[in-house]
Image (tube, helix red, strand yellow):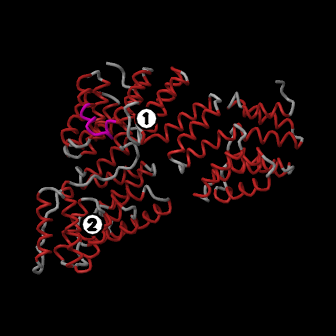
């Protein structure tokens, strides 16, 4: 058996969606139960309404839940019947149709303001809509009414929000804890936030209080084991995780954590856990993909091939599988296999990085022309991705200094997609290399006309006008517009400083270019800053800046051009 690749473990963590520190609670089995029509209508209905509700009932029985929800929500609006409204809210909650759930939970509360279930549905749907602060009072009401609250779900949402929202949420949580110091749901939520904020000792102490009361609580066990791992107490984490899975054998996230942890130490045990996960969750293709990767690592070729074939039935997962296999083939320096896999990663989000990796590998082993042929073939085979592939082809031609050929290629692309901003911008770069200012202006002004706040295009046009014409005042106006939009962008600050230099304001240029250089030591900024320093009389510092630029970019054409213009370098 080959040793476990670090990239395999990292890939599994990414695929699992569990690489973050957030131990978001898993929905309980009771919450996952399929909704049923639990309340009869409160008054007789007209025939058309009765027919719609009958269709909804039949749709429920045949698991056509979207049709059921459409019919129930239509009749809830039409009749304002309490029974129909409550059923609509429950079904929308089950389907994660959050806007619908919020609407009908709010209507439910109008006729039953003390309904813990309605408050819970409203809190959950608001949280999933990234509104945890709005959700909080409704979850608090659930707790006050004696219902089963889930503040941890709200905490998991707020951790992806701003620090200000997190602070407000934590204050509300602490206020509730002061009122209800023994409420474990509140403790779990706070422990989750402490774990995320890397206050592991405090998180562990709090969650272990919960486990004294509820030793088998899956949410608490999940936070405890992840916190132990963050503290570097891996053996304890693994022991507690085994216990947690034994006590909660159907809890997907706990078993998934155990499987991922075992990848570090015992691939065979990890495989056994993944096989259980796949059996328990037959529709989760991400788990099947992870199992396929483990079988591949264990040289279980037939099993891995069967699993890859199963994944191929779903294009998105097939694409994902081939992208991961391509990365692993790269780790093994098996370039033909890597290219073969990348060529089969045909859907997003994998297509973009896969095609870039394909181009990079092909360029290094086959050269520019062969790579261009391969990309052209890919473009013809997958026209839906033609824009990205054109850009990859253009980048190769730019590096090969085939500027006219690159311009012609992008002109062909724009003939069919004239409003593609990326293609327009790329063609303007080739126009600039060809000294074609009219071409630069045509493309960049087209972008600006459609998007007046496009700071990149404004800056590029201003910089090009400064370098290719004497229209320095116009160039300065454009770059200042860009600076108003992106005042801290190093490239835009550099353009402004360079224009000041070209206008003869050496002291102003040095000041502005120094600011740009403090933000980015890019070789182009170094060239401009160095030239301004040289002309200000600070020749020693200019040489230091250029030297640093050449250290990062040894063949920097702009620095060498600068040195030649200043007669500091012989041709």
Residue 344 position within the rendered picture, expressed as x and y whole percent measured from the top left: 37, 32
Magenta residue check for 425: no
Q: Which image quadrant is residue 556 in?
A: top right
Q: Is most of the magenta stretch helix, strand or loop?
A: helix
Residue lying at the far top of the rendered structure: 1
Residue 373 position within the rendered picture, expressed as x and y whole percent measured from the top left: 49, 27
Magenta residue check for 312: yes
Q: Element under label 2?
A: helix
Give the camera-side residue of 438 and 570: 438
Visible residue check, residue 494: no
Visible residue check, residue 41: yes
| Horizontal side, residue 162 vs residue 499: left or right | left
**Cα distance in 3D space between marks 1 and 2:** 49 Å
Q: Which mark is residue 121?
A: 2
Is residue 473 positioned above or below 133 on the image?
above
Q: Element under label 1?
A: helix
Give the camera-side residue of 120 and 40: 40
Residue 503 position within the rendered picture, expressed as x and y whole percent measured from the top left: 84, 50
Segment tinted magenta in the rendering: 309-318
Is residue 322 positioned above or below 210 on the image?
above
Callout 2: few (<14), some (14-19), or many (20+) C-alpha neighbours within 10 Å? many
For the C terminus, the quadrant is top right
Is residue 479 positioned above or below 311 on the image?
below
Q: Give the labeled residue for mark 1.
A: 380
| Horizontal side, residue 333 vs residue 455: left or right | left
């Amino acid at each position: 058996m080959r040793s476990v690749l670090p990239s395999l473990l990292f890939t599994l963590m990414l695929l699992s969606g569990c690489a973050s520190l957030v131990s978001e609670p898993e929905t309980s089995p009771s919450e996952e139960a399929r909704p049923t029509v639990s309340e009869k209508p409160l008054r007789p209905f007209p025939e058309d309404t009765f027919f719609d509700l009958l269709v909804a009932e039949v749709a429920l029985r045949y698991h056509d839940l979207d049709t059921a929800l459409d019919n129930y929500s239509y009749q809830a609006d039409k009749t304002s019947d309490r029974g129909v409204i409550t059923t609509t809210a429950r079904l929308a909650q089950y389907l994660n149709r959050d806007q619908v759930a919020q609407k009908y939970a709010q209507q439910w509360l109008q006729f039953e303001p003390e309904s813990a279930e309605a408050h819970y549905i409203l809190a959950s749907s608001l949280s999933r809509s990234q509104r945890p602060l709005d959700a909080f009072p409704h979850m608090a009401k659930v707790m006050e009414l004696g219902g089963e609250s889930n503040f941890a779900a709200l905490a998991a949402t707020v951790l992806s929000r701003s620090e200000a929202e997190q602070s407000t949420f934590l204050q509300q949580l602490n206020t509730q804890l002061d009122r209800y110091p023994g409420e474990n749901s509140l403790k779990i939520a706070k422990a989750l936030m402490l774990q995320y904020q890397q206050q592991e000792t405090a998180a562990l102490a709090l969650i272990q209080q919960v486990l004294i009361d509820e030793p088998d609580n899956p949410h608490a066990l999940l936070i405890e084991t992840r916190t132990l791992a963050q503290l570097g107490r891996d053996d304890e984490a693994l022991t507690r995780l085994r216990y947690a899975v034994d006590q909660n054998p159907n809890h997907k996230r706990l078993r998934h954590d155990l499987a991922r942890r075992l990848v570090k130490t015992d691939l065979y045990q990890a495989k056994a856990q993944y096989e259980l996960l796949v059996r328990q969750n037959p529709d989760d293709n991400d788990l099947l993909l992870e199992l396929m990767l483990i079988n591949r690592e264990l040289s279980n070729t037939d099993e891995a091939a069967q699993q890859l074939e199963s994944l191929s039935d779903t294009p998105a997962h097939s694409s994902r599988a081939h992208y991961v296999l391509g990365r692993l083939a790269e780790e093994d320096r098996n370039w033909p296999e890597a290219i073969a896999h990348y060529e089969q990663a045909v859907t997003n989000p994998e297509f973009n990085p896969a095609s870039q990796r394909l181009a990079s590998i092909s360029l290094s082993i086959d050269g520019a022309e062969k790579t261009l042929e391969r990309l052209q073939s890919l473009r013809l085979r997958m026209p839906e991705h033609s824009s990205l592939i054109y850009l990859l082809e253009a980048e190769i031609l730019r590096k090969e200094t085939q500027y006219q050929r690159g311009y012609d290629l992008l002109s062909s692309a724009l003939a069919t997609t004239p409003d593609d901003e990326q293609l327009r911008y790329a063609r303007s770069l080739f126009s600039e290399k060809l000294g074609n200012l009219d071409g630069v202006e045509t493309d960049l002004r087209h972008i600006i006309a459609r998007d007046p706040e496009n700071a990149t295009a404004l800056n590029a046009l201003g910089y090009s006008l400064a370098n290719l014409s004497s229209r320095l005042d116009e160039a300065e106006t454009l770059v200042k517009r860009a600076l108003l939009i992106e005042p801290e962008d190093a490239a835009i600050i550099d353009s402004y400083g360079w224009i000041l230099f070209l206008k003869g304001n050496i002291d102003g240029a040095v000041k502005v270019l120094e600011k740009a250089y403090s933000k980015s030591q890019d070789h182009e900024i170094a060239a401009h800053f160095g030239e301004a320093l040289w002309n200000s009389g600070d020749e020693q510092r200019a040489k230091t800046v250029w030297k640093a630029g050449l250290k990062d970019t040894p063949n920097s054409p702009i620095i060498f051009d600068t040195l030649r213009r200043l007669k500091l370098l012989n041709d």
